[in-house]
Image (tube, rainbow, N blue to C red):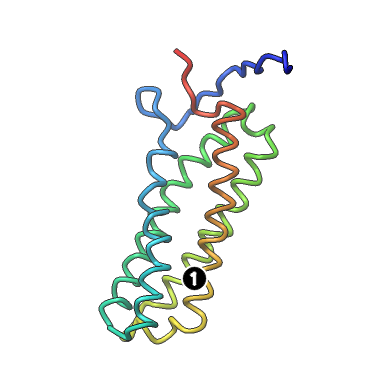
């Protein structure tokens, strides 16, 4: 029988917050959804060849990249201004994965800009889309660990 009680962690409050609600987790949902949706748009374009899906992919890549960079600014404020967050290896890993993911997403979006957004979907666009989705999964896992194991941005009031 396990008699060990769970450890109570003192929450780490965000400095980039509105009324105590951290901005980074609020802002990241749409860019993540756009970049994951890009996997489906690329697959639909490759399967059917409809230019609609190439244009949709261009917009999804743009929303994901630009929205992700905006959300990352809120995360960066917390990383650089909250010493308890700065001391967490998980926070640095999350930040590094996010920068890698956003760099890939930005390159993917930039490559699609132009007269024919479907020109580079295969193989480079799809490859970068899948790699971006992989980096999202790692960054999301580490972000979840920050919240659930370290109580970053959590209020216990």
Does residue 57 appear to the left or right of 10 in the view shown?
Answer: left
Q: Position of residue 86 (x, y in %)?
A: 65, 34
Residue 51 image-quadrant placement: bottom left
Q: Is residue 67 above or below residue 8?
A: below
Residue 150: image x %, image y %? 61, 28
Q: Which of the pair 114/123 is nearer the observer?
A: 123
Residue for point 54% across, 32% down: 147
Crowd band around label 1 with a 10 angstrom C-alpha radius: few (<14), some (14–19), many (20+): some
The answer to whether 137 appears left or right of 110 in the picture is right
- Say which residue label 1 marks: 107
Q: Position of residue 40 (x, y in %)?
A: 38, 68
Helix, strand or loop under label 1: helix
The picture places residue 25, in percent across and down from the top left corner, at 43, 39
* Front-lying residue, 156 or 101: 156
Q: Residue furthest left?
A: 52
Quarter of the picture containing the N terminus is: top right
Quadrant (top left/top right/bottom left/bottom right) for the C terminus: top left
């Amino acid at each position: 029988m396990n008699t060990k009680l769970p450890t109570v962690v003192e929450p780490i409050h965000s400095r980039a917050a509105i009324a105590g609600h951290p901005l980074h987790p609020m802002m990241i949902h749409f860019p993540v959804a756009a970049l994951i949706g890009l996997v489906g748009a690329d697959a639909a374009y490759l399967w059917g060849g409809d230019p609609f899906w190439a244009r949709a992919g261009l917009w999804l890549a743009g929303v994901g990249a630009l929205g992700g960079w905006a959300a990352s600014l809120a995360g960066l404020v917390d990383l650089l201004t909250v010493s308890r967050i700065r001391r967490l290896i998980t926070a640095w890993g999350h930040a590094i994965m996010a920068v890698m993911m956003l760099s890939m997403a930005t390159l993917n979006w930039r490559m699609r800009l132009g007269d024919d957004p479907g020109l580079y979907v295969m193989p480079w666009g799809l490859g970068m889309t899948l790699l971006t989705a992989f980096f999202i999964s790692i960054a999301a896992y580490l972000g979840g660990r920050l919240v659930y194991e370290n109580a970053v941005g959590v209020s216990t009031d």
